[in-house]
Amino acid sequence: MPIAIINVVAAAMGIKDKKNIVYDYYGLNYFGWFTSIEYKGEDLMSKLRDYIMEHEILLPAAYLADKKALTGSGEGNRHTKGSWYYVWKGVYEIMKNFPDTLPNTYLNYYLQQKEFVEHSSADHTRANEVMETREKNLFDGIDKYLATGEITEDVFYAGSHGDWIADLAIALKNDTKARFLVITENRGALPNMPYDAMVEVPAYIGKKGPEVIAQDNISIPFSGREGDRK
């Protein structure tokens, strides 16, 4: 999810070459926080915070322009549809309480359980949304390929996660020491997290694996060690 979040941040900030965005992040799988985001050396966090507070959501202005598309079904960017709208809305609500960080959107389900249940329907869940969109598009694309031999590019396009995996493989093979966000053994990278915890943190990737970028004690109530929290 951090990869998708940075894509949305880039779109909201009008940045096309998103690979020049550098960020610091800490957490566990699906449970973490961005503590800094920079683009070509320029701090984006304050600008991004102002944008989110103004729009009360983390979505690009172009997505928000079509008010009829928001939370509805039918045509339009899927990130404005159904439960996705509330995912990006939740970023604003969490940042009001943690203004110095940008949350992973999965924190909505931990920190806003009541709110998410209130706008959810047992008769039409997130699983239904996925089956009606991404799953249906993929199966339709497969059927078309089997029938005609034609590949629908937008169906089979790997997307940002596929790009990330390809870039990671290149870094491992060519020892590029490129910077990635990875899940790896803590080993003191986050001093007030257990040494043997599997943490999600930035690291330089080469042929010997991740060279984790050490950070200070984490300051958000997260580590589970009350005495270690700032």
Image (spheres, grey):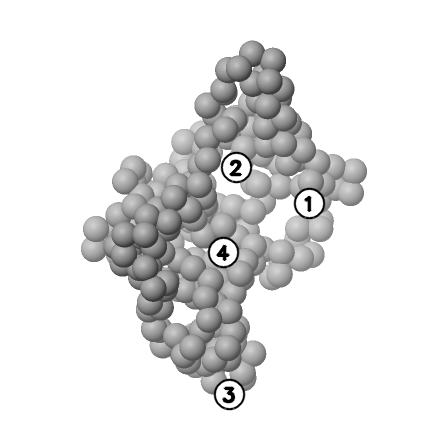
Q: What kind of residue is marked 4?
A: Asn
- The residue at which mark 3 appears reads as 227
Q: Which mark is residue 119?
A: 1
Measuring from the top left, give residue 20's x and y in whole percent: 26, 48
For marks 2 and 1, give the CA distance: 16 Å
- The residue at which mark 2 appears reads as 79
For marks 4 and 1, give the CA distance: 20 Å
Along the polypeptide, which appears first: circle 4 or circle 1? Answer: 4
Residue 81, image quadrant: top right
Q: What kind of residue is marked 2?
A: His
Q: Which mark is residue 104?
A: 4
Q: What kind of residue is marked 3?
A: Gly
Residue in the foreground of this view, choosing between 230 and 225: 225
Q: Which type of secondary structure does the marked residue at label 4 adopt? A: loop
Q: What kind of residue is marked 1?
A: His
Residue 226 vs 29, above or below: the answer is: below
Q: Which type of secondary structure does the marked residue at label 2 adopt? A: helix
How many callouts does the rendering have? 4
Q: Which type of secondary structure does the marked residue at label 1 adopt? A: loop
